[in-house]
Amino acid sequence: MAQGMRSKALKSGAIWGFIVLELIFFSVAGEFLSLSDKEFMDAENMLLLLKQSAPIGIIAMGMTIVMVNGNIDLSVGATFAIAAIVLLDSMTWPIFAGLGDWVIPVAWLLALAVGTALGALNGLIVWKTGIDAFIVTLGAMLAYRGIVFMFNGEQPTSHLNWTLVDIAEAKFLGLATASWFLLIVTFAVWFLMAKTVHGRNAYAIGDNREAAVNAGIRVGPHMMINFAIIGFLAALSAVVFYSESGSVNPNDGMLYELWVITAVVLGGTKIIGGAGSVIGTFGGVIAIQLLRKGLGHIGADTSTVNLVIGLILVAVLILDRQLNMRGKEELKV
Amino acid sequence: MATMSKQQIGSILAKQGILVAFVVFMIAFTIANPKFLTAENVLSVVRSSAILGVMALGVTFVVISGNLDLSVGSMMSFSTIVVLDLHDKIGPALAIPVMFAMTLSLGALIGFLVGYLKLNSLIVTLGMLSAIHGLTLTYSGGKNMDIADKEGTWFGVFGQGTALGLPVPIQIFVVVAALLGLVLAKTSFGRKVYAVGGNGTAATFSGIRRARTVFFCYIISAACVATAGLIQASRSLGSQNTVGQGLELEVLAAVILGGASLLGGSGTILKTVIGVLILGFIKNGLLLMGLQFYVQYVVTSVIIILAVWLDIAAKRGRLWSQIA
């Protein structure tokens, strides 16, 4: 029993141990390899890291819900790009011309509504047709990306609104706007998953769908709500990021789904559903961003980052399997 | 014909749905544009589908065995870059086998992880997608690869050559498809692949070595990727190091469109070939109709979802799912 708990604690603590390891490694290695004189664990650098984690992190929270549910969403990168275009383009629409700076909340709401609707559409198809979420969202990814390209071809869509940039670059209690959004979303999704009926149902459905149906949970609408949530969060991520940058390329958000899934899996969520935690995902997001930043700090290029992240993902899977096997042996005894 | 009940029509539609859809598309596009069904156009479509097609053939094995392979795109970039680099260093005759060996060892690694260690194939190949991409960038130093002497090499024959009136890429596609079709349909290995994907536990109990079967599926997939990389490298005699990016999903789309189930145990080489051709002809047909290039993504994904829907609706005997 005590051993079983140790294995559980080992698993949920693994991601934080990994983060500490990364911090130590990059601080020490940075002493010898870094070109800059700055310390890696500089407070300013760590705050920047939190801000840079926001775009992936906000989506990863939604992905945690969907994956705990036993589904997956590959369309988040494309939804992200569509929401960004809606945000920036709607501010130039003639019907909003009289609004002045009040166009900002309108554009935000529009972008969020579009993201939510696209996510809900995925959920509706999964619910009503019974097609596997992997296929539905694979199709949606292609289709949404196609729409992005149809809008403006290969050209970027740009609109800079300085009030908006001021809001995005503002700092409150030392944290950037994007960081606040990440923290608030993390807390909200944690609350949803840990403290509400909806969250408990999500685990139940992911663990055993038959049993959940027998227990009277309406699986279809439940899954649709979760897809709407991840669509909303993908759009929110775009709203947070593009309020500051003001220009979106049609390729933006590509491969985001892979980064997000990597972060969620690193955080301990099972791809088959039924297990996973929001706090773990937060750790996964931080770990990945730390790795990207740290490797950059010691002078490695992006190719190394890709290589290392891929290998770590596989290593985590092997480790997780070993821990699970030990857990099963304990059960036998 | 008149006495045919609604149910019978439904079951024919479901069984041969993808073929019916294919014929309907071909007719519609031909009516819309007479140029569509000319020998020249058909050949050019098949030729440009060959690279995607060869990769899809290998992925068919992996999918039937109940797994996924998301790493084929970045693996294709890898083999393209490697063969182009080695071409100038050790000559084409040596470069090709060395490139095959390197790509196959990547396939063997994935096969080992998924087959013998029983790790989730989606995550493993997702990790390998990223890792192999990094490997390619490291190998090429982030630069594009070009053959120095493009005039004086015979290497272009795989991608640009024609023999007996047919472009070589098409011939490679046909030969590989025929070969793998035979392996899948007529050999005991092929039957094992279906058994492992259909019910892994039952297969293990009937004495099939599951791990070994899955391992060889990934080896076949890697061999197909290497072939596709060879065609790609030979076609342009130079390449960016992201040439295969995103192809993994298009390949998967073709395989699913052909009717292979992601749950494993079903699918054939012929169906995959049809899936590849449908994707190719849709792209071409939409372009000939003067539509924007990007419309094809939207149309393709709608068709994929409709095809899968039709397939499972026929299996459960009703259109809408029973999910509460």
Image: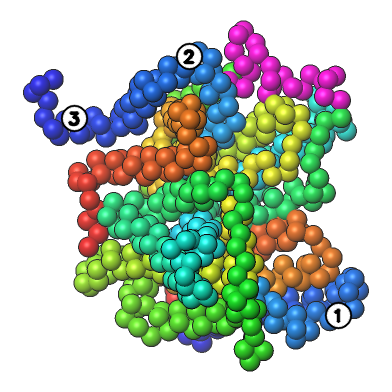
Asked if marks 1 and 2 fall on the same chain, the answer is no
Image x and y of residue B210, in percent? 49, 46
Residue B211 visible somewhere in the drawing: no
Q: Residue A208 or B320: which is nearer the viewer?
A: B320
* Residue A191 image-quadrant placement: bottom left
- Disc 2 from disc 3: Cα separation: 32 Å
Q: Is residue B112 above or below residue B77?
A: below
- Disc 1 from disc 2: Cα separation: 66 Å
Residue pointed to by mark 3? B9
Q: Earlier in the sequence, mark 2 or mark 3?
A: 3
Indicate which disc residue A95 carries. none
* Residue A45 image-quadrant placement: bottom right
Q: Amino acid at mark 3?
A: Ile
Marks 2/3 in contact by CB < 8 Å: the verdict is no
Residue pointed to by mark 1? A38
Where disc 2 sits, the SS reads loop
